Image (spheres, grey):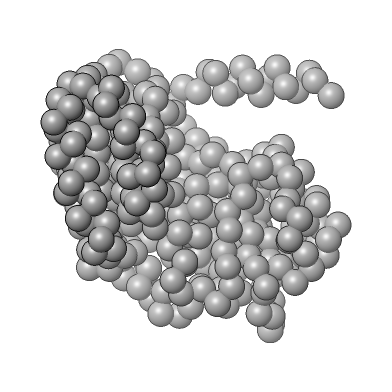
Amino acid sequence: MPNMRSLIEGLGIQMREALQSEVLRPVANPPVFRGVVVLGMGGSGIGGAVMADMLRASSPSPVVAISDQTLPHWVDGDCLVVASSYSGNTEETLAALAQAQERGCTLAAVTSGGELLSRAEQGNWPTVTMPGGHPPRSQFGRSFLGLATLLHHLQVLSSQDWEGLKGAVHALDGASAEERGEALALALEGKKVFLYADTPWRALLTRWRQQLNENSKVLANVEVFPEMNHNELVGWESGDEGHVAVVVRTSKDHPRTKHRMDITAQIFQDQGADVVVVEPDGASRWGELLDAVWVGDWMSLVLAERSGTDPVDIRFIDHLKQTLSGIQ
């Protein structure tokens, strides 16, 4: 298995390769879905959460990411349910998928194999596959672009969004992302980390948090504007120099949110906390997204390396799964 550094270095190549993904068992005339649900957990599920955020303003159907073993009651036979599981054996995803089958939903899959691929082959579902054998979180490019390929085929992701996404992939600057990720890691080192952005970027912040959790073995808090101005802001009365607030600012942030960020950042600083502003590169929202994902990956890796932490090791998760396997 390649080490995490080489996997992160190769994210750009991974994404370009993923753009060539083929939809197995394609659908001739997909219907207009009442709703779209993407099932997935952890590194397999974050692509669905990011996609749901990105399609808020353009999808003709609501797109929702579910990281749970129970399917919401409203999901029915007029909905599309995409199961995303890198291994193909994720317990919660397979449980929710079984409920979707019972309700007569249109089904699709993104996976490298396992039980999910077997079910997809048996059910003749449209599927995008990818190579296996890596930590799921290191395969964001393949899972996210695989999901995009599938949703474009099923006419959920518009041709305009698809072309914008492809352009963003080819415009990525890996050297710049590495440099900015390292600088961000140095600003976070030894601090309690708080991650903030405008509401449409919540899933991006979740990706950063997940990478800090798994690669760096660091806890981090995620909240978005304007919601944090109605509760969490008051909690900063206990903030101090041991805290760092990372504020992601993009070209499409709501005008009122920009003012909120300015005022809030000053409050953080008045409490003694460091404030780090991150402005992703990119000529579009897709470009800003992919750049920010790569910067966050480098951030988490550099923090791990500087602390002597193995970024691949997930012993607590392994222990949990092993223990659960003995419980019926």
* Picture residue at 50% right of the left edge, 52% below the top: 49
Q: Does 188 sit above or below residue 222?
A: above
Q: Position of residue 309 (x, y in %)?
A: 35, 18
Q: Does 16 sit above or below residue 158?
A: above
Q: Is residue 121 left or right of residue 155?
A: right
* Picture residue at 67% right of the left edge, 73% below the top: 34
Residue 153 seen anywhere in this rendered image of the structure? no
Instruction: Specify the quadrant of the image occupied by residue 264.
Output: top left
Is residue 38 or residue 84 the one in the foreground?
A: 38
* Picture residue at 45% right of the left edge, 59% below the top: 53
Instruction: Specify the quadrant of the image occupied by residue 7.
Output: top left
Is residue 14 or residue 177 the one in the foreground?
A: 177
- The quadrant of the picture occupied by the C terminus is top right
Q: Is residue 63 left or right of residue 200?
A: right
Q: Does 278 sit above or below residue 195?
A: below
Q: Does 145 sit above or below residue 243?
A: below
Q: Position of residue 188 (x, y in %)?
A: 22, 28
Q: Is residue 271 left or right of residue 127?
A: left
Is residue 322 or residue 246 the one in the foreground?
A: 246
Q: Position of residue 96 (x, y in %)?
A: 74, 48
